[in-house]
Amino acid sequence: MAIPLPAPVTARSRTTDLALVASFAALVAVCAIAPPVPTGVGVPITLQTFGVLLAGLVLGARRGAAAVALYVLVGLAGVPVLAGGTGGPGVLAGPTVGYLLAFVPAAAVAGALGGLARRVAPRWRFPVLAGAALAAGLLVIHPAGVVGLVVRAGLSLAAAVAADLAFVPGDAVKALVAAAVAVGVLRAFPGLLRER
């Protein structure tokens, strides 16, 4: 007697969504606690931005933002998953607050703009995803980071912009790497591109 095989899963399920959200929240946490590079303004250079952008590019706006929101909420609840192994509501009083609070909308923007990759030929996916990641970083994360530096670090606007500019080259590289990784993931799992 032959045992019938289960039907392949083709429809998006809540269980799959939850697993993807939790997995990418964990990925961002790992990126955050990787050894940071200290800077002179109290905002370390970490891989968080890579994880945030990758979550948006791979999962789309809704699930990517949910994954990053889960990560931020777990960190604010006190679990030491934020940059440098910190956690708790006290981080909202620090100079990183602007960057941290920008992560959720940045993942949503990367995901929304990255959704355009569905409409282009595969050879154009990397430029589309790279543009989405760069836009999310430069138009969402960095302006919010500057505001956080002005409000929490007491820097003038000019000094905060100058301090933030030190992060732009590294974040551009992280955005390009996130786009390259996203292309590979979406090639291997094309359903992720369709189900955004």
Image (spheres, rainbow, N blue to C red):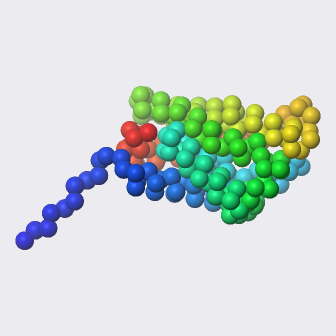
Question: In front here: 16 or 44?
Answer: 16
Q: Quadrant of residue 173?
A: top right
Q: Is residue 1 visible?
A: yes
Quick check: can you spot residue 162? no
Q: Where is residue 2 in the image (x, y as percent from the top left)?
A: 10, 68
Q: Which residue is drawn at 75% across and 33% down?
A: 143
Q: Quadrant of residue 87?
A: bottom right
In the rendered view of the protein, which quadrant contains the N terminus?
bottom left
Residue at 59% of width from left, 31% of height from top? 131
Q: In this view, does 104 lie above or below 118?
A: below
Residue 128 pos. (x, y %): 52, 31
Q: Position of residue 144 (x, y in %)?
A: 75, 36
x 56%, y 43%: residue = 65
Tell me: 183 left or right of 131: left
Q: What residue is shown at x 31% (from left), y 46% (from top)?
A: 11
Q: How many numbered marks appear?
A: 0
Residue 151: quadrant of the picture: top right
Locate the C terminus by quadrant: top left
Furthest-left residue in this view? 1
Q: On screen, 27 above or below 190? A: below
Outermost residue, bottom side:
1
In percent of width and height, residue 195 lies at 39, 41
